[in-house]
Image (cartoon, coloured by chain):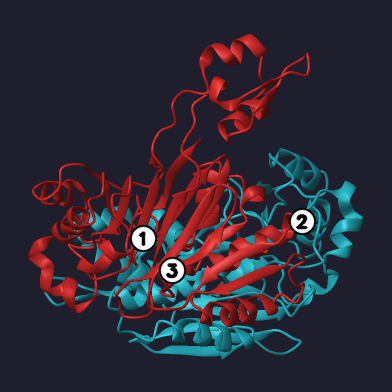
Chain colours: A cyan, B red
Amino acid sequence: MQFQIRILGSSSALPTSTRMPTAQVVMYNETPYLIDCAEGTQMQMRKFSIPFGKLKNIFISHLHGDHFYGIFGLLSSFNLLGRKQDLNIYAPEELKIIYETVLSLNKDHLKYTVNFFPLKGNGKNLIFENKYLEVYSFPLKHTKPTYGFLFIEKMKPLNIRKDIIERYELSITEILKIKAGEDLIDDFGDIIKNSELTTKPGDIRSYAFCTDTLPLKQLDKYFKNVNLLYHEATFTEDMVELAKETHHSTAKQAAEIANITEAKKLLIGHFSSRYHFSDIFIQEAEEIFQDVIAAEDGMLINL
Amino acid sequence: MQFQIRILGSSSALPTSTRMPTAQVVMYNETPYLIDCAEGTQMQMRKFSIPFGKLKNIFISHLHGDHFYGIFGLLSSFNLLGRKQDLNIYAPEELKIIYETVLSLNKDHLKYTVNFFPLKGNGKNLIFENKYLEVYSFPLKHTKPTYGFLFIEKMKPLNIRKDIIERYELSITEILKIKAGEDLIDDFGDIIKNSELTTKPGDIRSYAFCTDTLPLKQLDKYFKNVNLLYHEATFTEDMVELAKETHHSTAKQAAEIANITEAKKLLIGHFSSRYHFSDIFIQEAEEIFQDVIAAEDGMLINL
């Protein structure tokens, strides 16, 4: 089953000529889940071919502009595109008042329903689940209420056997159904069990998203051993005092969190615009943790 | 004196892969004046090297999202960049409440002053002037209160004589001062009159900006003979009924307004995302009016 992270924006508050502010898409089984929605997110979604019509769930970490100023344009565009289906937004509660106030100016109200789920609580909370995924929120520590998100797949990932595809001349739809655990009914009406169609299942995969925040050692209470940890690294260690003051993290601190939570891979981003290259972040983090990548706009990571 | 129009966005409400929603910059004497501020405007300003620090005046035509959703990010970025000087915004009055509500979420309030000038009235009003320019607003007819803008230079454009630059080894600052009408004091303290430094002045130049609107024949009460008329052309003539219903114009209607107001050149834009090429708009408008150009993102027009 497809489980990918697409980076739409990797800068901190100030966009640069190569980095937009924060937005990411989790693609799972052809379905996008949007995390944060900075200014320009709808343009980035178009650029990287994220299907607008399939987006049903938006998760907003906190209400600083560089994480949500794109929500107004996105909601408006959905309206113009004739959206009918519901949209779910999971965000700190003030966001509802804000987008309703801004959108009410346009008078032509949204023609679809927005279900708003305020983020709350001090612990780990299940905020969304469907057949395939569970999403949890957990508290981070920033200058205002901020939440991290944990995406965990429910089923062990199945890979279809190549010879099966050829033998039964399977369509994409059939392949996806088999990868999702279904059996196959052949032309004679016989049932072929899923276990005969797929190879031995892999381990359950997971993704944790942590921005904006001070480094929190207790994150291992909320997740451990994720396949990919996104942790902000706004600064390098020589600016650790500024990081502390502004409630952000350094690359070194992000790597320490990856160690503590025993992540398999670390993705860092939310780089301050004062840095022109990401190498310095990678170098610093790699001294502490082995497998580090620096987010770049447009990057696609397979889990 | 430099008098240029830079197109930052040329689509209507829905951005496309090649067109951002409406924003333009009038550059006069190295100073930018921003007209409309759709989502992504700060990114476009960066892309096309518009100096953030020199922007002091923002004109917003009306409060549909595709003309102002970029204001929140722009105001925030100015704050992050340490702006100290005042910013003037000329817009329909509800905008003030909206941006104050949105920005108050960030709690770290703007560290500079925004002077807000609500657009009002049914006629032509002088809303801004400095040594070089006058800007007027005038009413358009759309689904909500909408204003057009007229930029007129105060002084006839002066061109400095090339031999003068060489003879006195003039700096850029000195050249700009002479172009702005000042005399020169040479190394011996003698005054050389401006008329001896410059060629015969040209005619006063002007720019009219009209979007979003139905075609209004009475626009010739507000301006005539402008060097450049920007008039929206959301649709082509086969969609004239939809244009009427949505209070927009067709390319043909934009050309008719250019004729009525005796514009020297017509610039059309705000194209609906259903059209993939602008040729059809140009063809339609050229049947009515001779000198037509279609706005493209990044385009720079010298007046």
Q: Nearer the viewer, mark 2 or mark 1?
A: 2
Instruction: Name the disc covering residue B82, or none.
Output: 2
Chain label for disc 1: B
Residue A91 percent coordinates (x, y): 60, 82
Query: How far apart are the two marked residues, 3 and 1, measured between alpha carbons?
Result: 20 Å
Chain label for disc 2: B
Q: Residues at marks 2 and 1, common chain?
A: yes
Q: Residues at marks 3 and 1, common chain?
A: no
Q: Nearer the viewer, mark 2 or mark 3?
A: 2
Marks 2/1 in contact by CB < 8 Å: the verdict is no
The structure residue drawn at horizontal position 62% and vertical position 88%, both measured from the top left corner, is: A93
- Residue B118 visible? The answer is yes
User: Looking at numbered disc 2 in the image, what kind of residue is underneath it?
Assistant: Gly
Where disc 1 sits, the SS reads loop
Where disc 3 sits, the SS reads strand
Instruction: Name the disc covering residue B152, or none.
Output: none
Instruction: Name the disc covering residue B15, or none.
Output: 1
Chain label for disc 3: A
Query: How many residues crowd mark 3 within 10 Å: few (<14), some (14–19), many (20+)?
Result: many
Circle 3 residue: A32
User: Looking at numbered disc 1 in the image, what kind of residue is underneath it?
Assistant: Pro
Q: Is residue B193 left or right of residue B161?
A: right
Q: Earlier in the sequence, mark 2 or mark 1?
A: 1
The structure residue drawn at horizontal position 51% and vertical position 56%, both measured from the top left corner, is: B34
